[in-house]
Structures are given as structure tokens and as C-alpha cells.
Amino acid sequence: MDTRKLGGIEVSEICLGTMTFGKDTGRDEAFAQMDRALDAGITFFDTAEMYPVNPAVAETYGQTEQVIGAWLADRGTRDRVRIATKISGPNGGHSRGGQGFEPGNIAAAVDGSLGRLGTDRIDLYQLHWPKRGSYAFRQNWGFDPRGTSKARVQDHMDGILTAMKDIVAAGKVREFGLSNESAWGTMAWLAAADRTGGPRVVSVQNEYGPLYRMYDTDMAEVGQKENVTLLAYSPLAAGLISGKYAGGTLPPGSRAANDVMRDGPGNLGGRRTARADQAVAAWHETARGLGLDPIHMAIAFIRQRPFPAIPIIGATHLDQLDHLIAGLDLRLDAEADKAIDAFHRAHPLPY
């Protein structure tokens, strides 16, 4: 598999997401998934201190990192993989008592993740949400940017990056990234790195896929011009693109059946809408017309965007991961690109 550079680290151009490990995906199954991913050339794994989800609760806090750490120790694979994790923002209430991330506590949070992962270094350390708030997870419909002054935001950023400078110098973290961030926020973090000498942003983990393309309208240019790579989460719209929820079905044990996020059970964080159902049907029709698998087409679409992007693929069960891996050689041609453009014009932002 080809690789990409994130600052000073080299990662596979596909990332394995692990948010179900330790809950819906048990330890043995998680071990099997990491084995299978590594065999396929996927050497980049993403996790977070708050995982597993859904729901994310205090009782399971940190268990995904622990499962990964156990696998690293059992398989002796630490030098073969790159590990990314995330520190929770203030809306990760069960993480460290809801402290969020501050200049005075980020070092302790890094140490906590290092301990659970059983490693001496984190390859990519990410801020899970901006402290000032985010338009991610359908909050774009009512996001109010007036909550915090520019000066206070900049002071916070300077403090975080000053602390991160010491953490990086100690060898505990190699590169620094963001998540659920905006174009203004990303540029502000880059400016803060210039002011403080702290680590520069190398990645931003935002939602992106055929059904959710907000990144195209602002962040794409930031990513391309500033060499900030998109780590695209929910590329399959939390499973909607698979078609398993067509016609309002709710398969037992599926993410929607277990989902208790803020938008209510079964809504997949607000993604399940009538317009989304129509878009999924149209995506499948587009794929059939091209003779392609709709899941494989979605991942290939992200990999071929005109800005740096790495899709995060995740699965509850091994057979789902196998299906994803089976399509990683797909490259879309001009006919497919044209068909996807037509699809997007007909079904923009369906949730």
C-alpha cells in the first residue's frame, strides 16, 4: 500500500478506525481486525481516550486504547504501526471528569494514553473538538461563533502549543493534529504554532464522504495550501452507504440499533433522514451504472480528492473489514468522476 507523510511520520493511505473496540467489537475480534489490517498494509490506526462508543460512558473510558495496547504487546508490532489518539474536549464529559484540554492538564492526558496504549510515544496526538465549540455532528444548523472572543481563543491555543512543544521535545508525541475543526480554527492553530514554536498542525480529522462534503467548501483549500491532511471519518455515513438501513430497517446489533447519541436512538447522530435514504438509493444506482461496489466507490472517491485525504475505515465485525479491504485497489476513472459529480449536484448535504 502507498504511504503519505504527516509531518515527520509516514503512514498508510488508509487508516483503521477503532472506536468500537472493547464494546461492540470484543478483544479477540479487535485483535483479528488489527491483524487483518496490518496484513493488508494498513499501518495507521486511530483511536481516542474516550473510546469505545456508542454510547461513550465513564465505565468504558479508555478501553479501546487498552485493547490496542494489549495487541501491540502480544504481537510485538509497535514499530510496524503508527498510532493516533485524541484528547477529549469539554463535551467528552466522561473523560477525566470533563476537564477538556488545557495547558495545565494536557501532559497528564498524554501520559494517560501512553499508559493505556503501553507505549512510549504517540505518533499523532489530536484535539477531539475545539474548546470554543464546533459545527460538527449536525451542529452546523445552529452553531453560534460568538461564544468566545478571538483573544481568549488565541491565548488558549498558545498555551496548548507551548505545552505540546515540551511534550514533543520529550519524545512522547511526534505530530499534532485537530478534529472537528473549521477553516478559521485550523489557520488560527497554524498561526499559533508560528508564534509559539509549538508543533504545526499536520492533519484534521473531520467527517467526510459522498453524503457529507462540507470540507469541500472551505477546508479543502486550507488542506491543499497548508499541507494539512484530512483524516476522513464516517466515510460511509456511519453505515448508511452500505444500504443496510434502506426502507427504514434497523438490523439488530447494528450501529443504529445501538445508537444513543444526542439526536436519539437510531438516528446515527442525525444522519438518518428521508433525504439521506434517497441519496443512498441514488448512490447505489450510480454504482450499479458504473459496475462498481457502492462501498468501494465511496472509499476510492475520498482517496482521489484534489487535496490530501486519508479515509478512516472501521468495522464492527471482521467480515465488514474484509469487504472494505477487498476494494482498496479500486481507482475511479473520468466516467466515474463525472457520475459522482452529477450525484452530488442532485443530493447535496442530505443530512
Image (cartoon, grey):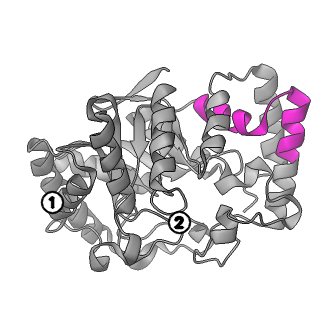
Horizontal side, residue 281 vs residue 117: left or right: right
Determine the residue positioned at 31% across, 33% down.
77
Q: Nearer the viewer, residue 130 or 256?
A: 256
Q: Which residues are magenta?
A: 282-305
Of the residues under marks 2 and 1, which one precedes in the sequence?
1
Q: Label 2 belongs to which residue?
A: 135
Q: Residue 243: x, y in percent?
A: 80, 51
Q: Name the amino acid type tagged 1.
A: Ala
Q: Nearer the viewer, mark 2 or mark 1?
A: 1
Dot 1 falls on a residue whose secondary structure is: helix
User: Based on the displayed image, in which of its 4 quarters is residue 275 positioned?
Assistant: bottom right
Horizontal side, residue 175 vs residue 274: left or right: left
Q: Magenta stretch mostly in which secondary structure? A: helix
Horizontal side, residue 323 vs residue 12: left or right: right
The span from disc 2 to disc 1 (Cα, nearest Å) is 27 Å
Determine the residue positioned at 13% across, 56% down.
163
